[in-house]
Image: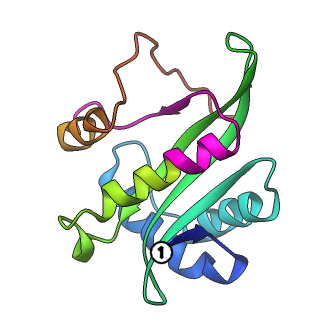
Amino acid sequence: MIDTATIDDIPRLSELLTILFTQEAEFTPDPARQAAGLRCIIENPSVGHILVLREESVIIGMVNLLYTVSTALGEQVAILEDMIVDPTNRGGGSGAYLLNGAIEFAKKQKCRRITLLTDKTNNGAIKFYERHGFEMSEMVPLRLFL
């Protein structure tokens, strides 16, 4: 079952983010910062939503949809971040189910586009997202940490 995360879910979501951030080249796990970020999203639905995939009562996956406005499209769009399925639950379609749920949720939020970033060397993730209709963009991400 996919539903939106609550404050009570933060400890488990932070565990999943720790797994994710050990796999990504640019990030280092920091549970306190992770919890603060999760709380910010959960408490401010205009910022975004965190969707969780539960198997019985246990969260086995999560994905964030963060909202902004595209002046090119003149409408709300979403940034998909922090998608992860617990490694013990991978390979059975949980990731596809979670991603499709996020796409449908974004449509209900009237988003016209979803953008995501993944490590350029993570060919498995790139192929996964392409199978679900995502296309490589000519845009190149640049960052300035403040």
Please tell me whether residue 86 belongs to the stretch shown in magenta. no
Residue nearest the observer in this picture, 29 or 44: 44
> In the displayed structure, does residue 14 sit left or right of residue 125?
right
Which residue: 66% across, 34% down? 111
User: What amino acid is found at the position of numbered circle 1 in the picture?
Assistant: Met
How are the residues colored?
rainbow
Indicate whether 40 appears above or below 70. Answer: below
Q: Magenta stretch? A: 103-121
Indicate whether 101 appears above or below 113. Answer: below
Which residue: 62% across, 36% down? 78
Count neighbours of disc 1 (C-alpha within 10 A) and say few if under 14, some if 14 to 19, many if 20 or more. Answer: few
Q: Position of residue 129 (x, y in %)?
A: 31, 38
Q: Position of residue 105 (x, y in %)?
A: 59, 50
> In the displayed structure, does residue 30 sit left or right of residue 21?
right
> In the displayed structure, does residue 36 sit left or right of residue 16?
right
Q: Which residue is mark 1?
A: 1
Residue nearest the observer in this picture, 12 or 21: 12
Q: Position of residue 69 (x, y in %)?
A: 75, 26
Indicate whether 115 appears above or below 101. Answer: above
Q: Position of residue 30 (x, y in %)?
A: 53, 65
Which residue: 25% across, 37% down? 131
Which residue: 57% across, 81% down? 11
